[in-house]
Image (tube, rainbow, N blue to C red):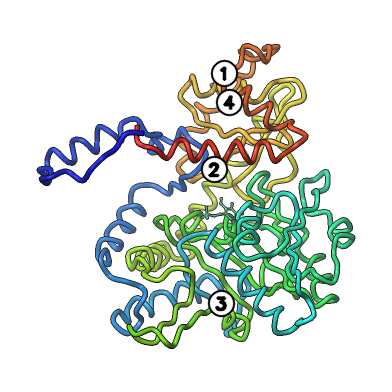
Amino acid sequence: MRELNLPKEGTPRKLLFEKMNEMKSGDADWRNGRMFSLIYNAGDTVLEVAKEAYAMYFAENGLSPFAFPSLKKMETEVIAMTAGLLGGDAKTVGSLTCGGSESILMAVKTARDYAREKKPGVTAPELLAPSTAHPAWDKACHYLGLKPVRVPVGEDFRADVDAMKGALNENTILIVASAPTYPHGVVDSISELGIIAQERGIWLHVDACLGGLILPFVSKLGYEVPAFDFSVPGVASMSADLHKYGFCPKGCSAVLYRDSERRKKQYFAHADFPGGVYGTSTLSGARPGGAIAAAWAVMNFLGESGYIKLADIAMKTTRKLIEEINAMPDMKVLGSPSASVFAFASDTVNVYALSDAMKEKNWLVEKQQLPASLHMTVSPFHSVVADAFIADLAAAVEEVRGIDAKKLSQEAVMYGVMATLPDRSTAKEFAINYLNQIYTLE
Ligand SMILES: Cc1ncc(COP(=O)(O)O)c(C=O)c1O
């Protein structure tokens, strides 16, 4: 393995940035709208506001509400504004975390500790989730000692409520639903799950990491959105990522609770530390002031009318893409997506080959499995490239028609094989070895 030591002498600033620009030149170029994942692009003005606010609080530490009361004020205001969008009321409380996964980790910890108090008889707690809920839920179970129980979704790709009911048992302390799901962009049957949660006295969390900052505006625009937020009785907590459709810089998500009695279980304090009594609200100790300040700035800069305008553009673009893809021979969009995330598949066209063919045309469209499909996260900025995308997709569909799996790229073959493995643990082991291998010095 190669070694690398800290340079003996510092690098001149000009040279440093030349080097960084050179390294960066190999990265995905999201600015031109040719990728449909990882980035939520609302245009340059929002980006500049976010950058200015982030830079203003670049060094400040969200750990201390006493040293930086302005950050505490901004955090509580961001939480209140998010709760207001999601059917919350004066009792709704929450915290800002560094992202969806941390919000999910916190929700699982909080529900677990709440159940420890309310249901002391449960010694082997279980989390019940549809197969489409984000892997961060399994990760949280892995970290926190819960058993994840996954239930296949229905033909509409939404949670199968009867199957979920059948999978409940006395150890189930948490039910998860998504608004919308990452893979197919559909909103789970949250009202029905709310009834079950209330009847059985089980905590229901709505993972609106993806949709929390767009679904409220999609609904205001008149699109049909199934009930998904705190207005649904039985919903105990929610997560909503500011760094997704909130168009805030990475490192910001809200985890919300129906009341502060629940949120208390999220907090941690250690009284005997020689450095002083130590208490934190979330997993992180030090927290980036920039991420909190930028979220506050972007939300206040856009306001409701700004978010509605962006949601309108994203939705019109999404509906147009869905319509055009459905009109292509043999191609179909899966389920009934509620927001601006969707997946498309085909019974005859090899979609992994299609993704490779699109890559050749300089478009990045992510592959998915179970079932094989391609994933689209549509941002407002994609309105600019939608026509070009559809034209290239239509051409690529014809190019790959009848293609033999042997002619596919290594990646597509591997993906296809992994997707059909009967023993999923092999794929898991492969993924872990792969991570172990790529995070080494080149
Ligand atoms: C529904 C849902 N939940 C959770 C997450 C995890 O969020 P993060 O990547 O910010 O940790 C995602 C990410 O896409 C998501 O779509």
Amino acid type, mark 3: Gln
Q: Tell me the tag on residue 266.
A: 3
| Residue type (three-letter) at the residue carrying disc 2 | Val
Q: Earlier in the sequence, mark 4 or mark 3?
A: 3
Disc nearer the start of the sequence (2/3)? 3
1 vs 2, front mark: 1
Q: Is residue 35 left or right of residue 50?
A: right
Query: Marks 4 and 1: in contact by CB < 8 Å?
Result: no
Quarter placement of the N terminus: top left
**Quick check: 36 above or below 65?**
above
Looking at the rendered structure, the kind of residue marked 4 is Ser
Indicate which disc residue 409 carries. 1
Is residue 402 rendered to the left or right of residue 162?
left
Dot placed on the residue nearer the N-terminal end, 1 or 2: 2
Q: Label 4 belongs to which residue? A: 355
Marks 4 & 3, CB-CB < 8 Å contact: no
Q: CA distance from mark 3 to mark 1?
A: 46 Å
Rendered view: 45 above or below 320: below
Q: Between disc 1 and disc 4, whose residue precedes?
A: 4
Dividing the picture into quarters, in which one does residue 100 lie?
Answer: bottom right
Q: Which mark is residue 378?
A: 2
Q: CA distance from mark 1 to mark 4?
A: 10 Å
Pick whichever of labels 2 and 4 is earlier in the sequence. 4
Q: Is mark 4 within 8 Å of ligand 1?
A: no
